[in-house]
Amino acid sequence: IEEQYRACQSALGISPEAPIKASDLSFDLSKEAGQLTAMAAEVYQQCEKHTGRLKDIRDEEKHLSQIRNLMLLLSGLDLDLAAFRRMQFMRATMGIVAQDKLGLLREGLSGRFVLTDRKVRPGEHLVMIVGDQEDQPLLEKVLAGAFFEELTVPEEILGNPSQMLKKIEARLNDIVVEKERIAWDLAVIGTRYSSALTTLGKKVHCADLHFFARDHFKSSKETLILTGWLPKDKVQDLKGLLASRNNGQELLVLEDDNAAAAKNPFGFAHLLAAQ
């Protein structure tokens, strides 16, 4: 139940659950579990079909944005990207090299490879290199020395860079519109289930407190033991309050600090009280 509620809370952008009152704690989780499970499942199902699609298009948007940046570098070139990749007997590569390394690249590949370049950013050039496959070892050595940053064009990118750029930008615009539609749909769900989510949030919070109490508060016929974290600067105040209440029938024990916890403003404390 809590996992589904937290997923809905994140998807719908709702604020953390409101503070609970003491009266909110008086509910039987075992009796209400069925109703709460059905409520959480209903809201979660409504959210999931939108959040799943939202994740998919965000992943697509990230992927296309990376390709778009590459196409911007290549735009204006009269180049068939598919044909460039398919060269069987020639070694073709493209990438970015610093302007001060361009001369080193030209000198090292002179007579063996055809090299063309154009400035794409301050101090950086886009370089395209084509040569014989047999000269691959030489190419790798020269590229490494020039700190060549190879650009890899994904397999799904075909045709002319400028044409591909137009298609990618059109799809990115469609994604923006689809994300806005999904956001609207989620807002409608948030409004429709506002009351249910408020109730569910309180119940989840109360259940957490019940389980925390079960795990940390122990008792016997004569003694009640409470365990938890206490601000170190409040230890003496609490000890003074306990001493003034009932003649030492309550004992506060703060575990000794170790080196790892020295900077922690909280201490782990045990409170023992007579029933």
Image (cartoon, rainbow, N blue to C red):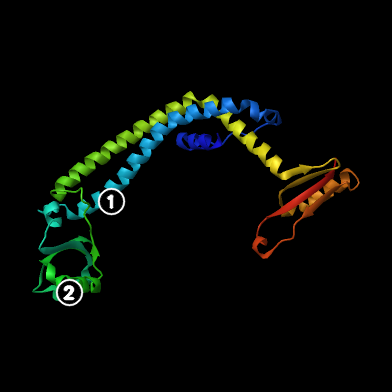
Q: Residues within 10 Å of mark 1 (few under 14, many from 20)?
A: few
241 sits left or right of 187 in the view: right
First in sequence, mark 2 or 1: give its number.
Answer: 1
Tag 1 residue:
66
Question: Residue 214, image x and y in percent?
Answer: 70, 40
Please, what is the three-letter code of the amino acid marked with disc 2?
Leu
Tally the numbered discs.
2
Q: Is residue 117 visible?
A: no
Q: Quadrant of the N terminus?
A: top right
SS state under label 2: helix
Single out the mark in the foreground, 2 or 1.
2
Q: Residue at x 22, y 52 (%)?
A: 154
Vertically, is 192 above or below 268?
above
Give the Cα distance between marks 2 and 1: 30 Å
Q: Nearer the viewer, residue 153 or 190?
A: 153
Question: Residue 98, image x and y in percent?
Answer: 23, 68
Q: Residues within 10 Å of mark 2 (few under 14, many from 20)?
A: few
Q: Nearer the viewer, residue 13 or 8?
A: 8
Tag 2 residue:
138
Q: Quadrant of the C terminus?
A: top right
